[in-house]
Amino acid sequence: MKKIILITGWIGYIWSHSVVAFEQAWYKIVIVDNLSNSSLETLENIEKIIWYKPDFFEVDLRDKNKLEKVFEKYNFDWVIHFAGLKAVWESCEKAELYFDNNINWSNILFWLMKKYWVKNIVFSSSATVFTSDNKSPLDESMQTWNCSNPYGTTKFLIENILKDLAKFSWFRVMNLRYFNPIWAHSSWFLWEDPEWIPNNLMPFIFKVATWELRELKVFGNDYNTIDGTWVRDYIDVVDLINWHLKAYEKLSPLNPPLQEGEKKWFFKTYNLWVGKWKSVLEMIKATEKIVWKKIPYKIVDRREGDLDEVYCNPEKAKKELGWEAVISLEESLENSWRFYNK
Ligand code: NAD
Ligand code: UFG
């Protein structure tokens, strides 16, 4: 029998890419999303790939009664918690909204999980949980507090709430931190194509390459990095999703059981990155090679809340989960460009 997974926020950018992988891995998927940053069109596109519509409920996590009805209807094995607000700069302007949406409403979800004995959870955390005192390459043993922006604080706090739920309520938690995912799905039905002006770098660069936007604004060139522009660790969405499937296998209580000497409670954190980095100017150059044209850009002031240099040491994931990113940056950019240019 298929295992049933409740996925919150699943028709967002990253997660809508994982349908095929989940289907192949034999999971039944139930989605809840309030459509605040996604649309039903994506769900229709998902249907074109898997030939049926996954069970979907338009539910805001704050609506406990509506969410409880979903818990009553299914016997979930896992929850994958992706729903949340995610723009670093916006969180600086609207911290209270981020605390409400990401923390308070997540807690409603955890409350219902406990009530219905659903103890396995995979949580989408982020590189923003690290304190800016840490120097890259970051690894899982490094300090995570004093975050640079409220969005990071929400992820840091949820990580710690889940740690306590693991310790005291027997939740089994896979806490996955990732950074800058890119690419469009090979089916081309799914892609990151926000109708409004994108916040994230890569969709912005591609929209400049297609002349939809005039020029890229580079937020600062006075950081302490190779060329003064910020540095990030980019990962292909498909690599990221495969990584999640590995994590789910590990989360299953039977596979493997806790090792002798291992703590009784199960809370594991993995950094989900490639371990290679690129500055913004290097990303522009790398994209120019793929699109065969110049990307006009202008240096402007720093953006609030940004960190300068963030990339990671992916050894733990390699060693414990046997995961390694296999898709090169060039391949990711080529695939994205094929979509944007079609
Ligand atoms: P996204 O905004 O595309 O998707 C998030 C989804 O959650 C959206 O469909 C939105 O409608 C939904 N949502 C938000 N608040 C909700 C609520 N209260 N109730 C129900 N649904 C709600 O984001 P994404 O890029 O797919 O990211 C998914 C997760 O991964 C987020 O938790 C994000 O913080 C994390 N993450 C993303 C990145 C990235 O660069 N994209 C990096 C690190 C971590
Ligand atoms: N940037 C520009 N110009 C732009 C957009 C971005 O110069 O038009 C710069 C930003 O200043 C930043 C870098 O590009 O330094 C990357 O910015 P993104 O907005 O693409 O991504 P962030 O690194 O700020 O944040 C992303 C996700 C978050 C996630 C975070 C770390 O959006 O959800 O990575 O995990 F949490």
Image: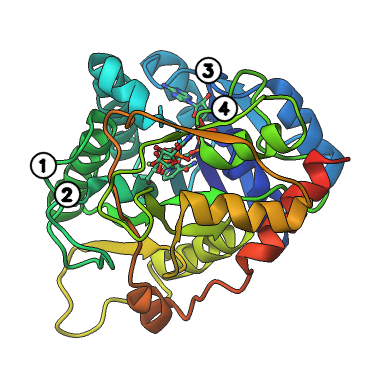
Residue 189 falls left or right of residue 152 = right
Q: How is the image coloured?
A: rainbow
Which one is in front in this view, the residue at disc 1 or the one at disc 2?
Answer: 2
| Amino acid type of the residue tagged 3 in the rendering | Ser
Q: Is residue 140 visible?
A: yes
Q: Quadrant of residue 142?
A: bottom left
In this rendering, would 143 be left or right of 241? left
Q: CA distance from mark 4 to mark 1?
A: 27 Å
Q: Earlier in the sequence, mark 3 or mark 2?
A: 3
Q: Position of residue 75 (x, y in %)?
A: 50, 42
State the SS at label 4.
loop
Q: What kind of element bears circle 1?
A: loop
> Which amino acid is tagged 2?
Ser
Q: Amino acid at mark 1?
A: Asn
The disc placed on residue 132 is 2
Q: Amino acid at mark 4?
A: Pro
